[in-house]
Amino acid sequence: MSYSKQDRRARRHRPDPYSPEDWWERRRQGFGMNLYRNTRDKKVAGVCAGLADHFNVEPWVVRLITVGGFFFFNMLMVWAYIGAWFAMAPRPKGSVIHQRYRYDENLHQDRPVNMFRYQGSASDRLDTAKERMNEVVDRVGRMERYVTSKRFELDREFSKIQD
């Protein structure tokens, strides 16, 4: 099989995806999937914290799996950890971790969605919604009673005099 001169030239100038220079650049870019060592929340090298950021779980979960791997796979896990330490670049300063958020009814704010951060059951959330709705209905009832009372008319007249 012979290639034309133009095909040989095009093959020669095409970047090699397996070249060492390209690998180092992809490593610096987090391999295109936000895979970095988290040196801010590290315990040893930041590998477990970085994997936790990547999989959007709590770091203690990845650390527990790693310790279990050390017990069951011994040196294989040690070499895997060292390999991950070498392969994962430290997270660049100022980079942002992209996470999904969900509204937390108890805290009344958005919180990151993590695999091992459980919410209450559906029936518990429904009970909470019922309680909050009853509070709103009571508040609206008190406002209606005030607006339709003689006290409201008296307060409104006093406010006209003050202006």
Image (cartoon, rainbow, N blue to C red):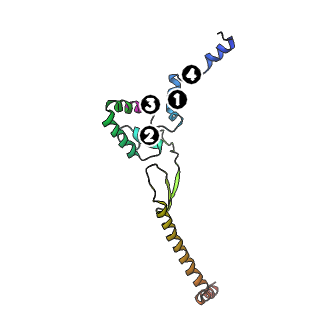
Q: How crowded is mark 4: few (under 14 residues within 10 Å), some or many (20 or more)?
A: few
Question: In whole angstroms, how far apart are the C-alphas of marks 4 and 1?
Answer: 13 Å
Tag 4: residue type? Asp
Q: Which of marks 3 and 4 is nearer the N terminus?
A: 4
Label 1 or label 3, whichever comes before in sequence order: 1
- Quick one: SS at disc 3? helix
On screen, residue 8 above or below 104: above
- Residue for point 35% across, 30% down: 76
Q: Mark 1 points at which residue?
A: 25
- The reply, left or right, for residue 16 in relation to residue 92 is right
Q: Can residue 42 be seen in this view?
A: no
Q: What element carries label 1?
A: helix
The residue at 46%/37% (across/down) is 36
Looking at the rendered image, the quarter that the N terminus falls into is top right
The label nearer to you, 4 versus 1, is 4
- Residue tagged by mark 4? 16
Q: Is residue 153 above or below residue 6?
A: below
| Residue at image mark 3 | 87
Label pair 4/1, CB-CB below 8 angstroms:
no
